[in-house]
Amino acid sequence: MPKLSPGTWIERELFESKAYLALKGIAPQLLILIYGKRKFEKHGKKGNEKRVCVNGDCISFTYIEARKKYGITFPRFLRGIDDLLSKGFLKIEHQGGGYQKDKTIFALSGNWIIWKPGMNFNNRKKERNQRGYLNKE
């Protein structure tokens, strides 16, 4: 796999879309960070090469990475990911679990193009942790 480039490309259609402009809080920044994780390869004949994203369906971005590298707290991270999922920028390919030390794998999605207010594309499965004392008999 090619290494990450020093920059990334964001299409005007994306950052002028209704879905992008409706993102709240940390979600726009998370989207840029996730887009920065894309890897591209050149395809085609020399002089007519096109850059193609080769990992658009297997991008991992963990809370630990968000906290250590960017100082993003857990609640902000979850709200941002939930917003990106619901507006069609991301979808979950594999649901990880923090207690199993398993990463969630995201795929980039193009559903943001058809997003309208009130639409909800994807939801993250909420963790069902039972907190507090449980009387097991």
Image (spheres, rainbow, N blue to C red):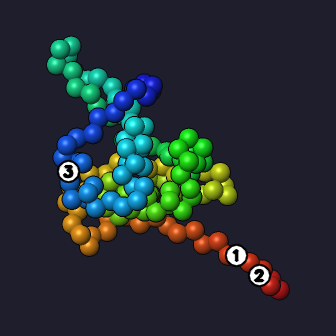
* Count of picture labels: 3
Q: Quadrant of residue 81?
A: bottom left
Q: Quadrant of residue 80?
A: bottom left
Q: Which mark is residue 3?
A: none
Spatial CA span between label 1 and label 2: 8 Å
- Earlier sequence position, callout 3 versus callout 2: 3
- Asked if one can make out residue 91 in the rendered structure from this viewpoint, the answer is no
Q: Does residue 65 appear left or right of residue 123 in this picture?
A: right
Residue highlighted by disc 3: 16
Residue highlighted by disc 2: 134
Q: Nearer the viewer, mark 3 or mark 2?
A: 3
Spatial CA span between label 3 and label 2: 50 Å
Q: Residues within 10 Å of mark 3 (few under 14, many from 20)?
A: few
Q: Residue at x 43, y 28 (%)?
A: 4
Residue highlighted by disc 1: 131
Dot 3: element: loop
Q: Does residue 84 appear left or right of residue 43 in this picture?
A: right
Q: Nearer the viewer, mark 1 or mark 2?
A: 1
Viewer-side residue, 103 vs 36: 36
* Amino acid under disc 2: Leu
Q: Position of residue 33 (x, y in %)?
A: 42, 42
Q: Position of residue 15 (x, y in %)?
A: 24, 48
Q: Nearer the viewer, mark 3 or mark 1?
A: 3
Q: Is residue 70 above or below residue 2?
A: below
- Earlier sequence position, callout 3 versus callout 1: 3
Q: Is residue 20 above or below residue 46?
A: below
Q: Residue at x 66, y 55 (%)?
A: 100
Spatial CA span between label 3 and label 1: 42 Å
Q: Residue at x 23, y 62 (%)?
A: 115
Q: Position of residue 47 (x, y in %)?
A: 17, 14
- Asked if one can make out residue 78 in the rendered structure from this viewpoint, the answer is yes
* Amino acid under disc 3: Glu
